[in-house]
Image (cartoon, grey):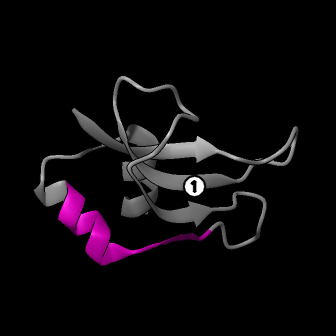
Amino acid sequence: MVKIRFSRIGSKKMPYYRLIVIDARRRRDGRAIETLGHYDPRKENNKLIYDKERLDFWVNRGAVLSDAVSNLLNS
């Protein structure tokens, strides 16, 4: 199964996340199939920046959104 979830790339106490497509059996920071965008929770607007066309492509192919990703997309 393929999932769309976050991968943490920030340093200690300075989180920064990439929005990735990854096999569900891989670890959180494992090798991704594709990077779709990024998210910086420390900024005021907390904006998730991503490629909507590629996200729709992967969802149509059966990829499952993680809870955190779906919450940010719906807000």
Q: Residue at x 39, y 39 (%)?
A: 67
Report x, y in % for residue 45.
Answer: 67, 73
Residue at x-position 22% and y-position 46%: 63
Q: Quadrant of the C terminus?
A: bottom left
Foreground pick, 46 / 7? 7
Q: Amino acid at mark 1?
A: Arg
Q: Is residue 5 magenta?
A: no
Instruction: Pick whichever, 49 or 45, lies toward us.
Output: 49
Please state if 33 lies on the left or on the right of 27 as rendered. Answer: left
| Residue 68 coordinates in the image, percent (x, y) | 46, 43
Secondary structure beneath dot 1 equals strand
In percent of width and height, residue 52 lies at 33, 75
Q: Position of residue 54 (x, y in %)?
A: 29, 70
Asked which quadrant contains residue 26, the reply is: top left
The image shows residue 23, relative to residue 74, as above or below, that is above
Q: Nearer the viewer, residue 22 or 67?
A: 22
The crowd level at tag 1 (other Cα within 10 Å; few <14, some 14-19, many 20+) is many
From what the image shows, is residue 47 above or below residue 61?
below
Q: Which residue in the protein does label 1 denote? A: 18
Q: Is residue 43 left or right of residue 69?
A: right
- In the image, which residues are magenta? 47-58
Query: In the visual, does 58 lie left or right of 46?
Result: left
* Side (left or right) of 70 relative to 17: left
State yes or no: residue 53 in magenta. yes
